Amino acid sequence: MKKTFFKTFFVSFIVFSLIWGGFIYKTVIKAQSEEDEDVYNESFIDRLMHDKDDITFLMLGIDSKDVKKATNVRTDTMMLCKANKSTGEVHLLSIPRDTKTHIRGRKNEEKINHAHVYGGPELSVKAVKDLLGIDLEYYVRVDYNIVKKFVDLIGGVEVYVPMDMKYTDPVADPPLYIDLKQGYQTLDGDKALQFLRFRKGYKDQDLGRIKAQQQFIEAVLEKTLRPGNIANIPQMIKTYYDYVDTNIPFDVMMKFAMNAKNFSPDNVSMATLPGEGEYIGNTSYFIVDKEECIKLVKTMFIEDKSVENIEK
């Protein structure tokens, strides 16, 4: 069974920067500013607070023992993320891994998740940039094990399991054993992975699974932002060093941390790239609906609504 639940990692990443940075600001920098207000008024933090409001980055989910050195592996999931530090709005766009597109340096169109094989996260960023016609330079690569670590770190996540979930695949990598009962419950890290990896049984198939994943995201975000999790910040830092690779500069992350109070699960919007599956020969592809894609990308990511340079 393929791992398609990496969209949940966005929450872990952004919340990490918000809580960690916000905690540093409130307990260290702010305290220092009270002692020396003149110095604070010209500080590094002040400059960050007046920087650009938006950040857009590509989330890449991979299966690798060392996420920082991962090569020659396909991405399991791609998600484009945009966050605004002033309004607290967050837009998430899932890009199906089988999306048929042009990849720089390749003769024929291929699945977009192949880009990481040929050129790592940098080429993946270029592929999405070309496909959607947007400005994009930042990426975040994550290993799926961060979900288990992070959920345990925040003391579990309260979710509603919509049905009995039972599935076994001992030859999967890692082996897959799912056994959950229907109802409201607190999932630890291991059970959270089971919940996210379960596919069979949803009445509306993929849409039902996506909805369940989105509810999980909201639950993780709400739990992580609780004041009681401040004590877990040191372990959060270690977890991210182990399981996250990003080219987002520290000062850029910090400017969002300074506005942690603005972010809320209610301000998160999610969508999937419009299109449909299609077999070409014996290969299954996701074919983008370019007209609908242009509309969606303009709404979610592009301030200049006249831009229409979606890949032709």
Image: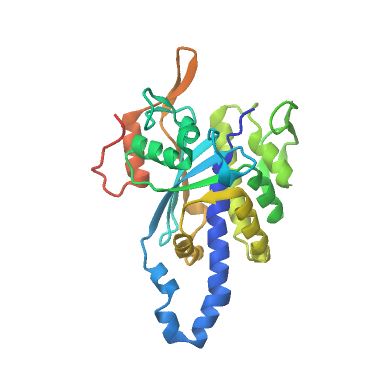
Q: Position of residue 66 (x, y in %)?
A: 62, 44
Q: Residue at x 48, y 27 (%)?
A: 98
Residue 51 shows up from this direction: yes
Q: Which residue is outermost to the left?
A: 306
Q: Is residue 310 left or right of residue 60?
A: left
Query: Along the line of sight, which residue is nearer the eye, 127 or 279?
Result: 127
Q: Position of residue 264 (x, y in %)?
A: 51, 57
Q: Is residue 159 left or right of residue 8?
A: right
Query: Along the line of sight, which residue is nearer the eye, 33 or 120?
Result: 120
Query: Along the line of sight, which residue is nearer the eye, 31 or 126?
Result: 126
Residue 156 shows up from this direction: no
Number of on-image labels:
0
In the figure, residue 175 lies in which quadrant?
A: top right
Q: Residue at x 51, y 87 (%)?
A: 35
Q: Quadrant of the N terminus?
A: top right
Q: Position of residue 248 (x, y in %)?
A: 46, 54
Q: Quadrant of the C terminus?
A: top left
Q: Residue at x 38, y 39 (%)?
A: 126
Q: Residue at x 57, y 38 (%)?
A: 62
Q: Position of residue 23 (x, y in %)?
A: 57, 69
Query: Along the line of sight, which residue is nearer the eye, 84 or 232?
Result: 232
Q: How is the image coloured?
A: rainbow
Q: Which residue is outermost to the top?
A: 281
Against 112, residue 19 (above or below) is below
